[in-house]
Amino acid sequence: MTMGMSELFYRISHWGPIIAMIIINCITFSTLQVTSMWLPFFSSWISVCVYVLFLFLVSSTLYNFFCAMFIGPGYVPLGWHPENVNDCRYLQYCTLCNGYKAPRAHHCRKCKRCVMKMDHHCPWINNCCGHHNHAKFTLFLISAVCGCILSSVLLFIGLYRAFRINWYFLYGDHQYIVYLTVYQLAFTVFSFGLALGVVLAVGGLFYVQMKQIIRNETSIENWIVIKAVSRPRADDDIFIYPYNLGWWKNIKQVFWEPQGNGLSDWPVIQGCHPYTLTIEQIIQKEDKKARKKQYTIVQSYNGSWFPISKGDGYMEKNAIQMKQRIVIQKDGFHAVVLLNLRLQMEK
């Protein structure tokens, strides 16, 4: 097997892409099946437009889904350092990649690489969302939402006609009766629920993504900015986010005119240093180290998502989380940081 085929298999053979494909196929098949009963393809010019629009949205969803998955975010080369050696003092060093973290880059524990302009690691595409695939990922989101809105409308009409089948037999057009078996009805209701779920969940994610694109921020950078604004400073020291070039330029930078190589040549607003954000990160790291305290572990924990073994009190304060928890062993040591009156444990 070639490296290309190995990478292809690795990306697809994960629960995220598999579930995503099942959801897309269920909604598509159910929508086409039910809609064909009450709105045949060539029954009118409206029906042709509806089918063409729906199939276009399905195709756009699949195309951008696979592009986001296989194009990837772009990775900082192993052992990378800036051309000007003096600039290394403004950057954090990644011991896992044996190189410096480029501006806007962060190390992904899942991908095991430093990712250019990393936003987040998405389990649904089994890849990171970053510099090279941010546009495709966002287009995948909006295509899925629009497709599921149309699917929800078509399935709702189909279900309404199926539940009102007796009325349509007596007073309606017999040619376009929607008759569903028990299994077909259950599958249609299930698909309708999936479509509504996608509209709500993916629609919310699309809203967050667009809000960040308009500000030219990633999810990680948003968290850095929040800490930068709240961090105690001198009266004349005001933090200015360097990459917000204006909403229109920010949008063009993602969708139409990607600039730079994703490493050290990001355009910044006037008055900002090319390493303004990385310098702020280093200051925040040093501040974090200053507030560390070492504690002895008195009870082991396996890092499970559902910590029911730790009692009701722990469950009330720490419900199920989808992100990884830290595995700890009794009599070991961990550094703990006091942050906003909460204890934040670090590896």
Image (cartoon, helix red, strand yellow):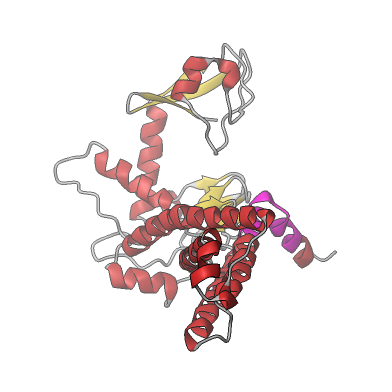
Q: Residue at x 49, y 88 (%)?
A: 45
**Where is residue 3 shown, x and y percent of the image?**
78, 64
**Where is residue 15 shown, x and y percent of the image?**
67, 50
Pick the front one: 98 or 198: 198
Pick the front one: 339 or 285: 339
The main secondary structure of the magenta stretch is helix
Q: Quadrant of residue 297?
A: top right
Q: Quadrant of residue 87?
A: bottom left
Does 10 appear in magenta?
Answer: yes
Q: Residue furthest right?
A: 1
Query: Is residue 255 visible from the viewing direction of this image?
Result: yes
Q: Is 226 positioned to the left or the right of 88 in the image?
A: left
Q: Quadrant of residue 55?
A: bottom right
In the rendered view, tell whether residue 310 sits above or below residue 342.
above
Q: Which residues are magenta?
A: 7-23
Pick the front one: 338 or 292: 338
Quarter of the rendering occupied by the C terminus: top right
Q: Residue at x 59, y 13 (%)?
A: 299
Q: Is 257 positioned to the left or the right of 69 in the image?
A: left
